[in-house]
Image (cartoon, rainbow, N blue to C red):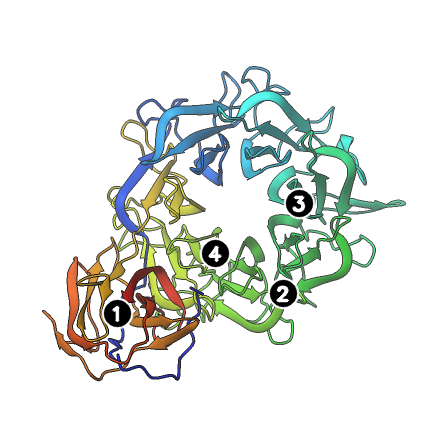
Amino acid sequence: MCSRLGRGRKVLPVVLVLGLGPLSSGARAQLDDTGTQVWSQDSPSIEGGGEAADWFGFDVARGDFNGDGFDDLAIGVANESVGAEATAGSVNVIYGTPTGLSSSGNQLWNQDSGDIEDISEAGDQFGFSVTAGDFNDDGYDDLAVGVRSEDVGGESGAGAVNVIYGSSSGLSANGNQFWTQDTLAGTTAEAGDQFGFSLAAGDFNGDGYDDLAVGADDEDLTTGMDTIEDIGAVNVLYGSAAGLVAAGNQFWNQASTDIAGVEEEGDVFGSSLAAGDFDNDGYDDLAIGVTGEDVTAIGDAGAVNVIYGSAAGLDAAGNQIWHQDISGILGEAEPGDGFGFSLAAGDFDGDGFVDLAIGVFSEDIGAIGDAGSINVLYGSSSGLSSTGNQLWDQDSVGIAGVPEEFDGFGNDLAAGFFSNDGYADLAIGVPGEDVGSLMEAGAVNVLYGSISGLTVDGNQIWDETTSGARAATESNLFGYSVAALDADGDGDANLAVGVLLGDSSVTNDVGSLVVLGDTTVPSITVSMDKAVYSPSETADVFLNIVAGSAVITADVYLVIQVGSDFFFIGDGGATATTDVVPYQASRVVSADEMIAVYTDIPLAGVPPDTYTWFAGFTEPGTFEVIGDISIYPFTVAPVR
């Protein structure tokens, strides 16, 4: 049955339908605190040892590194000491299982791990950025690790990227790689470039191999005797059967031919990255944060460049630049806004075109400085468009939370299917959020997708206390990083939240990770008193709700299929007995319950054949199906 139900105009002798209206005032299916997990390097059996200011959870990324169908989580520990090398950095990897993330088989990676290319050095910050993609298309995701302060030759802080490949047993040192700008086109490694500051994986040429974009946000541009400092750049390495290769690699900045924008000192082009197919042409596209971009005379207002994919890879044709002074874009460019500080790609309206959420973490909300906001641009056949764009902050009508100075709403973003309804949802890190009197305890807002895009309906705010992890603590910075992953493989995404200065049971400010549980969407079942009837009989139909772990807002429908036709059943010819009042305006689905029993439905006049009932939930006032559809076939047999 199609996911969008149309209204039938034909009438049957059997005319009964339910139009119960909204089932509750909550979300259709939401994240909840069922089974919340808290992880740190002091968790039992987790590799590494917690140390103050390790920054466990500085960045997080999901990937299925062993190909078992359960998402795994890579956790950057950018300030981890490795031996005597302070802030050399490491990455913990925790694997998914049918019961969620498990310490079984967890790993700790750094440049001193056996056979990993290069060596750990003080200040490297291995794990400053992490992303996952299947660069060799072998069915196992691989892990790219940014080492933004790696020294290359005599160039201090030039930056590097390590790549560790997946296998049936998880990440393995076999075939691992070490990349710097000295091995790539367009530039050479220079002091302070910070190659590896940001990372994004996507298939930009549609060949089935994921490719890797690497931000070098402090790249300088030298022309003759003139140098423009920190304009930023992005290198792109392409995947192959052998993994990432230098062949065909690209170098992009605002000085690249035909790229929109003007290169300026301090632009930091490449400070954030996100990949998604914004025009649904089969090639992933690349969004590039230019957080320090001046918009006319407005310093550091910020912008986002978008370069589109093609059979030949990323191509300047049709590239775009977006900021808050673009006609039609909501918001207003202001000094220091940092538009583009974070990026996340997801199909929030389920139309097949990926959309882009843009963090503006230093946006002022009225007189409240640096409270933060996000802009959302929606995809189309021509790419990202201002049509229907949105601006969200904690002062938006109905959004949970209150904007406060230095909240940093939009510090990090993650798109995922938390409600598993076909629309991507958005998690928004707010690490500076005050929780009661606890300053900068941190929070995460969650907005849910719908046919019209991100919506206020059912939005949530989480902190350490409400997540069920532990009591919120001042200056923990809950929400510094966020990621969506399906650790137990049930189709509903979990939310991983980095708590940059979270305490463990034995170490203060070690950094920790909170993983919120996913939800089970309530369902409805339709059944009858038997499966075969004669035309002279009457039938009974039963509707039962099977509760999930969340309430939902939905309409209930009952449809009968006759041949190739579908009919919405009306309200005549049947007697309903229920344990609740039918057609109630709203109902909280909080437990298993029988919603209705329809008795003595006349079947006379129905042609001999097989028919099918369909029942389920839809978005209120629409025909967008939520969750599973219940199916019950029955037969009206001719009298012999």
| Gap between marks 1 and 3 measured at Cα | 45 Å
Residue designated by label 3: 217
Q: Image check: 166 left or right of 633?
A: right
Look at the numbered disc 4 and give the secondary structure of its residue.
Answer: loop
**Residue 235 at x, y percent in the picture:** 72, 42
| Gap between marks 4 and 2 measured at Cα | 20 Å
The answer to the question of whether label 4 and label 1 lie on touching residues, with beta carbons closer than 8 A, is no
Q: Nearer the viewer, residue 178 or 565?
A: 565
Residue designated by label 4: 410
With respect to residue 126, does 279 lie above or below?
below
Mark 3 or mark 2, which is nearer the start of the sequence?
A: 3
Quadrant of residue 69 within the rendered picture: top left
Of the residues shown, which amino acid type is indicated by label 3? Asp
Residue designated by label 2: 384
Of the residues shown, which amino acid type is indicated by label 2? Leu
Mark 2 surroundings within 10 Å by alpha-carbon count, few (fewer than 14), some (14 through 19), many (20 or more) = many
| Gap between marks 4 and 1 measured at Cα | 26 Å
Say which residue appears at 44% left-offset and 35% top-offset: 72
Residue designated by label 1: 25
Look at the numbered disc 1 and give the secondary structure of its residue.
Answer: loop
The answer to the question of whether label 1 and label 3 lie on touching residues, with beta carbons closer than 8 A, is no
Instruction: Choose mark 4 or mark 1, whichever is in front.
Output: 1
Instruction: Choose mark 1 or mark 3, whichever is in front.
Output: 1
Quadrant of residue 634 within the rendered picture: bottom left
The answer to the question of whether label 1 and label 2 lie on touching residues, with beta carbons closer than 8 A, is no
Mark 3 or mark 1, which is nearer the start of the sequence?
A: 1
